[in-house]
Image (cartoon, rainbow, N blue to C red):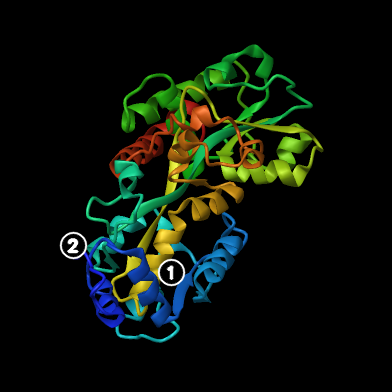
Amino acid sequence: MLSKLTKLLSVSAAIAIVASSASHAENMDDLIAAAKKEGTLTTIALPHSWCGYGEVIEGFKAKYGIEVNELNPNAGSGDELEAIKANKGNTGPQAPDVVDVGLSFGPAAVKDGLLQPYKVAGWDKIPATAKDPEGYWYGDYYGVLAIGVNKDIFPESPTSFADLKDAKYANGVTVGGDPRTGNSRMMTVYAAGISTGAAAGADAANAGIAFFKELKENGNLVPVEGTAQNLAQGTSPVLFDWDYNLLAMRDKLNGNPPMDVVVPSDAVIAGVYVQGISAYAPHPNAAKLWMEYLYSDEGQLLWLKGYCHPILFNDMAERGVIPQELMDKLPPAENYAKAIFPTLEEQAAAKEAVAENWAKEMGVQ
C-alpha cells in the first residue's frame, strides 16, 4: 500500500507514486493529477444503451476532462480478455485499460494474469461473493430475476414464487425457454428452488425442477418462449427474466398492454457483472480514476438510471441518496435488500443438476 502523501511532495513525485502497483489510491487529488497527465482512458465492450453507459462515459469525460477511446462496443466478455492478451506489449489505442465482464470471466482473467489489483473507496460495501479478495475484480452492477406480468390478463400480480401455484395463473407461467440452454432460465429454476428453502447449489436446482414440474402438472406452466411479443399477446402473460430486461420491455410496451415487474419476495437471485483493470493498461491511473467514478454515488446512479442495479444500491438506499424519480421506476427496494449472489461453484453445481435432471423430470427431450 502507498505511504501517506504529504503536502511537501511535488506533483511529479505524487504521480510516480500513484502510478505504482498499489491496490488503493491514498489521495484522490494525486490520482486525478496522474490520470489527467495520461489524458486518455481506453474502454471496450460498452454499448451506450447498456446500463446507461452512454451517460456514464460522458459524465466521466465532463468531470475530469479525460478522453475516452471506445473499442468495439458490441464485444463480449471473452473478446475483452482476448483484447488484453493480444495487446500485452502494445501501449497504443487498441489496448484496453479496463474491462466489464460476466462474473465467471473475472477469475479466468486472474488465472491468466490479465488483471491488476485495485480496491475502490467503496470496497468494503461490495458483497464478499461479488469480488476477488485481493481486488483483481469486483462486482459493478447486477440484475435480479424478476417476474413480468401482463396486467390485462392477470390484474393481480403474483408477489412470490409460491403465488404461482395458485389456480388463477392457469396457462400463464413460463420459465422463458429451455433452462439447459440459457443462463437466465437456468437461474430461474435455481431461484424457484431457493424459494422452497433448498440449500444453495445442486439442491436448489433440483428443488426448482420439482417446483416447475408441479406447475406443469397443475396446468399453470406453458411451454412457450418468454418474449415481449408472447407476453403482449397473452401466450406467456407471466414470464421470468433479469429485471433490467423486463423494465426495458415495460417501457417499450408503453402500456399496451400494461405490464408489472415484480421482484419475488421469497427468492431474490442476482446475476452480477464485474470490473477489472488490465495488468497491461497503458493508462493505469485513468483506469483507477474510472473505477472511482463508477463506484461513486454519481456513477452508480447513472447505472441505475439505465435499470442496472449498482452493486452499492443497498447502501445508497439506506443513506437516502437515490432520487425518488428513479425509485418510482423500479420495484420496491426492500426486496432488493434480500439479493443473494450465488458463487461460481454454486452456479456450476446448479447448471450440472439442471442438465442431468430437467429433461427426465419434465418429460421433454
Which residue is pictured at 29% across the width and 61% down the height? 118
Residue 185 seen by the camera: yes
What crowding class fits label 1: few (fewer than 14 Cα within 10 Å), some (14-19), or many (20 or more)?
Answer: some
Drawn side of residue 260 relative to residue 18, left or right:
right
Task: Work out whether 121 lies above or below 82.
Answer: above
Q: Which tag is nearer the camera, tag 1 or tag 2?
A: 2
Q: Which amino acid type is marked by label 1?
A: Asp
Count the marks.
Answer: 2
Which residue is pictured at 62% across the width and 33% down the height? 239
Q: Which mark is residue 79?
A: 1
Task: Work out whether 210 lies above or below 35.
Answer: above
Q: Which of the pair 177/75 is nearer the observer?
A: 75
Residue 360 location in percent, x, y? 43, 30
What crowding class fits label 2: few (fewer than 14 Cα within 10 Å), some (14-19), or many (20 or more)?
Answer: few
Could you say whether the residue bearing mark 1 is in a helix, strand or loop? Answer: helix
Task: Work out whether 158 lies above or below 34.
Answer: above
Residue 111: quarter of image? bottom left
Could you say whether the residue bearing mark 2 is in a helix, strand or loop? Answer: loop
Residue 265 location in percent, x, y? 51, 23
Residue 184 location in percent, x, y? 50, 42
Residue 86 location in percent, x, y? 35, 79
Q: CA distance from mark 1 to mark 2?
A: 32 Å
Q: Which mark is residue 30?
A: none
Q: Which amino acid type is marked by label 2?
A: Met
Which residue is pictured at 55% across the width and 66% down the height? 57
Which residue is pictured at 55% across the width and 61% down the height? 56
Looking at the rendering, in which quadrant would you find the N terminus? bottom left
Q: Which mark is residue 1?
A: 2
Task: Work out whether 94 lies above or below 175.
Answer: below
Q: Which of the pair 144/222 is nearer the observer?
A: 144
Looking at marks 1 and 2 on the same chain, the residue that comes earlier in the sequence is marked by 2
